[in-house]
Image (cartoon, grey):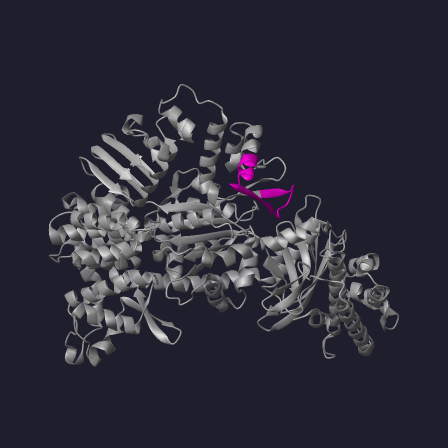
Amino acid sequence: MTIADLVAAPDRQQAPLKTLAHVEFQLRVLGLLCAAAAGGPTKLATPGSLDLWFRYITLQRSSLGCDTCQSAALDVADSINAEVATGTSIRQMRNQVFHGGPDPENVDLDALHRVVAANADQIVAIHAHGHVTRLDPFFIPISGELAALNDYSEGSATYWPRRGPATDITRREILDALQKLNPQGGDRLLENFALDIQKDLRGFAERDSIQTLVVPPQPIVARWDLRTSSGTIRRVDRFELNVDHARTWQSESGPKPYKAFLADICNWELLKERLLEELEEQIEVEGQISDELFPVLKRHVPDVPARVRVADGPFGDGSDVTITQACERITARAGIYSSYTNLITLTGEAGSGKTHSLLEFARESLSGGGEFNPLAIYISSSGTSANSLDTLLDARMARTRILDRSSVLALCRAGLAILVIDGFDELLGFRTYDNPLTGLKPILDALRGKGTLILSARSSYSEARLRQNLEHHATLDWPPYVTTLELLPWRREQLRMLTGQLPVDVPMEETSPEVRQLLTTPFFCLAFAAWARSDKPLEFLQFVVETYLQRERRKLAGQGGIELFGSGALADIFSEVAELIARSAVPEISEEDLELAASQALSRDLSKEEKRRLIALCGMSAEWAEDELSFKFTHLAIAEQFLARQVARLPLDQAVSLLFSVPISALCAQLIVSIWRTQHGGAPTELITALQDRVTTAEPYDQSLPGAISLGELWAKVHGTADGHREARRIRIEDLELVGSGRVSLEEAHIQNLAVGPGIELLLTASYIYRLDLSKSSGAALVGDSYKQVLELLTQSELAVGQPRIKHALGLTEDAADDVSEIDSYFRSSLLLARGPIIVSSREFTPEEDSRLNWVLEYGLDAWQGFVRRMQTEGKITLEKVNASGRPKVRLRATEKFHKQ
């Protein structure tokens, strides 16, 4: 598309209102051409209006450099005074309409069309005369079409194509080019409000129907067509900023908060009803799956409260609370704007109750009263073939007949909704540890530093990988603040609370230590209670597998009731399926792959009857994905169990190959150890040794190597609690607790939280430890210079950050001297430990009412400012302007040099 295409006269059949809007668009294009012809700093003010563009062209047409083009430009500007109805000019009619007046009547369509046609011809001739050598950054191509600059602020720019909605651009080269041109700022607060209104309306309006007028200090006027199930409704709405800069909507009954406007156009109460209806269906499906496994027992789970550990940040201080309390804190802050999106990750092993907790959170938010309390919009990736959050959102919201992706995100930006994505790692295949930002970036960009998003993931590794990507990927325009909610393992009291409600005596004291270690999630606690009340002579893990398989055999009977697959064969099939799913990094497999797994497990081809009946497996939930059936485990804990079973049944070299390629969870590691002890009569030390050899020789080595993660989890379960000398190299693990006795040597280890118990000596070599907990031991536990690999040290009396303070806490120096090296070490460690973006004022680098950044003032403001400037000079930190309210702000972004120093 060219300039000619942008300004071309529309068809005569187009509605007069749209043609009036096109006149303004033509003036915008001409004004931008004048600015581009100037070839330097411009007095351009964005976003502009019809009158502003008229004045700009009149004053700046001299940049066109010739009398002919200047005269033509003046003719285009004066065209807004052309009469297109009796006694009414284009300017008068346009202002009348966009200030809420009636749609134009008795318009001389021929006269109006002559104006836009003449304007188009003159603008094309001006451009063809060659006064403009470069169209960018005033015009840039977007999706193959040329688009004109609509608005610019320090953090983003908006471009408007000839057709369709405006597009937000945050590309650094575009923003830098615009900044050098020094465009003038208007009433930024009002103009930013108008832009946000336009973005929000895209989710509710008919395409191309949104027109806004911003003429400070008058109210913003928006004319648009609201989509409804029965057709479209023409609306004219007005908005203002009050004396406190709060955004308001001028409703028929008087001023109301902007939230009330969004609630009005999405039919708030009806929306809650429809979301609740759909949610109850999901709750029923979730209950059916568990009831099939544990009939009668499942209904007791809601009576046992789940507890979570909330990471330091806006929602907690690292302490333990109930999941209900954590959700109340999240809800209370949903409408608070703080320059970043709050991204909360709920982590926990398979079967720990993540789905149940999130469903209950969503149900309460939809059932409760209170005016405009935020809704938790629950989206499950289970059974979906969507490969992105965009497609998943549109698919899930279609049933409401009210919301789509754009409108959901509008509600989130306003604090009216909290988006909950359950099983995020399943959707994006986190088991391969690909960059999770691939799926998150479009959503974060659309939220633009606002709103609240909750993601559930089966393992803390998903959250850790996400946080690592956020730290290292400088291309993310709106980095969120990440807070972790970790579902805690069930304690003995919770198991007693559960079993105390059942008509069964549960002999916990008589169970083996391996089984007791598994009783940390609702799933396995229910399985344990069911096992205790059954009369089957099976070991606990055998009972869990048998319970899962018994319903499958009922559906796999052949002709004459003959059983096609026995329990052992079926378990082998599921084990092969678990490996196939883990290796492919997607939660489901195709019908063809299911048949392949069965053939491999049975070491023979399947008969036609066996193939026909195989797809009836209810343990493998069948879903339609594109044009074929796909299959997935109905419960993640079962998938983990069969994956562990596969590791234990494979030959050693094949088991090592699987663990090297697939990062296992803590639960899977525990299951491997338990099954291995049953089948082999001891711990899987030979397996760990072989995997260690494979990881040690891997080149090039990366800390996110799946084998290093698998090794870390297995090593922790077997050697973390042992006695005597033990060592490991290149293990990666989120939480490792060393107990027992003897020296532990860790080389090239990458550990988030490392706790050392009494009786342990720890030698670290070339390792990276975020937090070392010596609160149950002492500094004497550290051997040599191990402290140098620690960012944060917790002792019985203090939390030390940075090398000088850590040395001081260990008694290795007399005093902590306030020198440059100490200051740099402290600030560097604090930056590395930070879970969210560092947003400070652009002039003083102060955090401005963000208590989580109080550490920047630890050594005084001068020391902090000196650190930032040194890091900036050395290319280790960059400062990026942020489009936020109040004083100008910048985001501190650590470069690759900073991470490597």
Q: Please say if 243 is above or below 194.
A: above
In terms of depth relative to the viewer, which is nearer, 873 or 17? 873
Q: Quadrant of the N terminus?
A: bottom right
Please state the horizontal and vertical placement of residue 314, each as a whole percent of the image: 49, 41
Please state the horizontal and vertical placement of residue 170, each as a whole percent of the image: 59, 55
Can residue 738 be spotted in the picture?
Answer: no
Task: Please indicate whether residue 353 sits to the left or right of residue 315 in the image.
Answer: left
> Residue at position x 30%, y 29% from top?
784
Can residue 473 be spotted in the picture?
Answer: yes
In terms of depth relative to the viewer, which is nearer, 220 or 787? 787
Tell whether position 886 is magenta.
yes
Q: Residue furthest top?
A: 814
Q: Residue furthest right?
A: 87
Q: Please say if 552 is above or below 137.
A: below
Task: Please indicate whether residue 586 sits to the left or right of residue 575 in the image.
Answer: right
Tell whether position 90 is magenta.
no
Please state the horizontal and vertical placement of residue 496, each as a whole percent of the image: 25, 45
Task: Please indicate whether residue 512 sits to the left or right of residue 620 in the image.
Answer: left
Q: Quadrant of the C terminus?
A: top left
| Residue range (magenta) | 868-890
- Number of on-image labels: 0
Please state the horizontal and vertical placement of residue 198, each as a whole percent of the image: 64, 60
Q: Please say if 503 is above or below 120.
A: above
Question: In the picture, residue 650 is in which quadrant?
Answer: bottom left
Q: Please say if 186 is above or below 557.
A: above
> Residue at position x 48%, y 34% from top?
827
In terms of depth relative to the viewer, which is nearer, 565 or 77? 77
Question: In the picture, residue 123 is in which quadrant?
Answer: bottom right
